[in-house]
Image: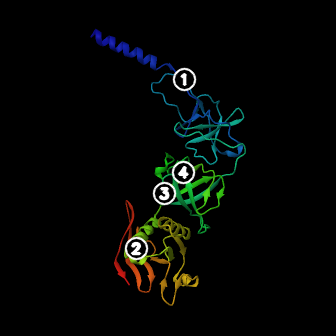
Amino acid sequence: MRRLSIMVLALAFVCSLTACSSIDWVDFVKWDNIIYVRDTTTDSIPKEYIGDLIGSVKKVAPSIVRIPNYKPKNGMAAFLELDTEFYEIIGYDSNRYIAVLTNEEYVVYKTIESKSIFFQDSVVSTSDLRGKIIDVNGASILLVNMEKDAGSSDIYWINVDKVNIIGANGSALNSSALKRGMLVDVIYDGTIQESFPMGLGGISNIYIKEQSNDIVGLYRTVVDDLYAVDPGLNADANIFAFDLTGVSNLTEVEKAALIYLVGNTYQVETIAGTFDELHEQGYINKDELYFEKGILFIINDTAMSGDQFTFDAEKWRSGLGAYYFSDCTAKKTARGWNYNIGVEMIS
């Protein structure tokens, strides 16, 4: 009984010490259940980067805490005065970075896992591109512009190695999270590097919006499969032509990206055009029905219904040299899109 009393007394003594302890706070502010700490490696933020007001300090953290496992409350800060305001930083996710106005300057507070960010003396205005990921190659992605006014050449190769990637739920991710078919918002400095595909300058953030359909990936597989069958039709072909006028499940810029990727894979010249257009341009001899230097791929599909659609695909070299995948059914699965061929034909 005496031993038990001593143990209880000792425990009470420890608890009394723990329940009334001094805390050496770091310079933090907590808002919306997120703790941000002062980034002392970053200079003050130019005013041009300051966005909307997020909130202000509502309570100063106590120097003495009487509750074990104490957790700061929303609106609490350690070394900031009451009513100190914090703001969004333009071009950066507010779930990771905020600007705090203190001593007449804006300073960066960030989540512990976030990288430091740096600013130019005078800001270059940021731009926002809504795009779709068409291909992923290591730390580089092929992106197409999905805005309504996008042209068929609005295709971009961008490097995402040192870019902040933010998931749809606001979490910080790495580049391995970027998948073909994803819709994303890319924040960059407005600079477009003129090449084909084009580049984007000063990319700071990529926001994942949702996973969409990777029909380009499906049709790349179809073209690969068509190319592999009846290989005699491919002899000495160094031009791949594509008639995608009957494809309804791709935008014009997605069609252009598909053509680019196939050409890049097979290291051949690629062009878009119908049989008649290719004849007018001198590629196809209409009298002899022969594409001397290349192959014409033709795809026609039906509009998507639910998670499937049908299509026909053809590889044409001449009037007596063609291969057909007819009455194909494409279906979306947990692993992406695949297809089944209804009938294969040769001429």
Q: Which mark sits nearer the N-terminus, 4 or 3?
A: 3
Q: Which mark sits nearer the N-terminus, 1 or 4?
A: 1
Residue contact at pointers 1 and 2, CB within 8 angstroms: no
Instruction: Quote the CA–CA distance across marks 3 and 1.
Output: 46 Å
Instruction: Quote the CA–CA distance across marks 4 and 3.
Output: 10 Å
**Where residue 180 sits in the image (x, y, percent)?**
47, 59
Instruction: Quote the CA–CA distance across marks 1 and 4.
Output: 38 Å
Q: Is residue 313 visible?
A: no
Q: Which mark is residue 136?
A: 3
Q: Can residue 229 be seen in this view?
A: yes
Instruction: Quote the CA–CA distance across marks 3 and 2.
Output: 23 Å
Question: What secondary structure is found at the residue carrying circle 3?
Answer: strand
Instruction: Quote the CA–CA distance across marks 1 and 2.
Output: 68 Å
| Residue 148 placement, left or right of 11 | right
Residue type at tag 4:
Val
Q: Which mark is residue 160?
A: 4
Question: What secondary structure is found at the residue carrying circle 4?
Answer: loop
Residue farthest along the left direction in this orientation? 1
32 or 191: nearer the viewer: 191
Residue type at tag 2:
Leu
Residue wearing tag 1: 24
**Where residue 346 sits in the image (x, y, percent)?**
37, 82
Residue type at tag 3:
Val
Residue drawn at the location 50% of the way across and 19% of the way down: 21
